[in-house]
Amino acid sequence: MRKQVILLPGDGVGREIMEGAKAVLNTIAGEYNHEFIVHEHAIGGDAIDRYDTPLPEQTVKACENADAILLGAVGGPKWDGMPAGKRPEKGLLGIRKSLGLFANLRPVQGFGPLVHASPLKTELVDGCDILIVRELTGGLYFGKPSGRSADGEEVVDTLRYTRKEIERIVEKGFEAAQMRSGKLTSVDKANVLESSRMWREVVEEKAKDYPDVTVEHQLVDSAAMKLITNPKQFDVIVTENLFGDILSDEASVLTGSLGMLPSASLRTDGVGLYEPVHGSAPDIAGEGVVNPLGMILSTAMMLKYSFGMEEEAAEIERAVKECLEDGYHTRDLDVQGGKVVGTDEMIKRIVENLSTKSISNAICSSYM
Ligand code: IPM
Ligand code: MG
């Protein structure tokens, strides 16, 4: 297969982790005879520095013509004082919105060697496997009006959704639940917000089309509490933009491995943007210690969701798991008895691990 991939390294550790994505793509291309045509573009603070805008027109154009996009991270203290329209985050929000990437999938899955590092008791988190389906292009992030009054004494943000916008994300939630254990938890604040009451209505209507999925509704405050007290009760969670933002950060610490978590932002035609859940980590940027696995697992998600390369994606996941089981990890992870390595070394190990398979395949095939 031949695919066009845009790389948006962005800020902070973005560039270092993107090396991991490139190395893995190169290896997979070689092993499976694919061609990935990659081009790099600016976004976030990096784009502000070079082009005076967090989302240059040429970046948007390149992404519009791509099959998929890999993003490192945006933001950092350097741009903190910038006016609202010129913050690095605007670049990320802008690209999500202009490409119509309304469905954000954030899987939270424990890796055996890391479970003991969770701040929660092992028995609570062992075997935890949650998928958060977050609406990404509506709600408070984009509703108008928003801003500050002329005298600076009043502010407004608007939580707005159309029925259609709710329907399409709720469908994604049901589809995901169907492919997993058949359980969907819809999270809202229907005791207070009108938008949540419509959300609940839509979920009830759609439930009729998915008789094999069991649905429950939870209020967001209570869901936040249960994520800590009994996370294993959740399988797929579907929720609006801001609730999903908050719950996904909360869920990301359950498995003791924030640096490992990937995400996908999708629309209906398979085009997607893939990025690790961790941010730009300016405090460790440039030190060669950042964990590249969140980016590498995001690359695996891209292969699976945008390109239908299930086997290739599974290979990457296997390589990551085996590296951890062999005890290699970056310093953010706590693997008992393991060996701390830097970013480059970690990437090298994953690549070697991916290639080992092809060598053994080559040997096998020569005997067939
Ligand atoms: C995320 C981030 C972004 C968001 C920020 C950087 C704009 O927190 O992807 O979760 O709020 O969506
Ligand atoms: Mg967030």
Image (spheres, rainbow, N blue to C red):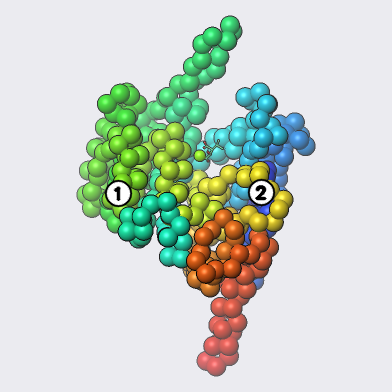
Q: Where is residue 272 in the image (x, y as percent from the top left)?
A: 53, 48
Query: Residue 152: which quarter of the image?
Result: top right
Q: Which residue is drawn at 46% across and 65% down?
A: 113
Q: Do the residues labelled 2 and 1 touch (CB within 8 Å)?
A: no
Q: Earlier in the sequence, mark 2 or mark 1?
A: 1
**Which dot marks residue 230?**
1
**Looking at the image, can residue 123 be seen?**
yes
Of all residues, the one furthest to the top in this rendering is 151
Query: Residue 125: which quarter of the image?
Result: bottom left
Q: Tell me: 120 left or right of 14.
A: left
**Which dot marks residue 364?**
none
Kind of residue sitting beneath label 2 = Ile
Q: Residue at x 53, y 73 (%)?
A: 326
Does 33 appear above or below 47? below
Does 193 appear above or below 333? above
Q: Position of residue 334 (x, y in %)?
A: 51, 60
Q: Position of residue 329 (x, y in %)?
A: 57, 64
**Looking at the image, can residue 31 be seen?**
no
Kind of residue sitting beneath label 1 = Asn
Q: Where is residue 248 in the image (x, y as percent from the top left)?
A: 44, 43
Q: Residue at x 49, y 17 (%)?
A: 156
**Which dot marks residue 284?**
2
Of all residues, the one furthest to the front in this rendering is 337
Q: Nearer the viewer, residue 226 or 167?
A: 226
User: Crowdedness of circle 1 by 10 Å Cα count: few (<14), some, many (20+)?
Assistant: few
Q: Is mark 2 on a helix, strand or loop?
A: loop
Q: Tell me: 204 left or right of 97.
A: left
Q: Which of 281 and 191 is in front in this view?
A: 281
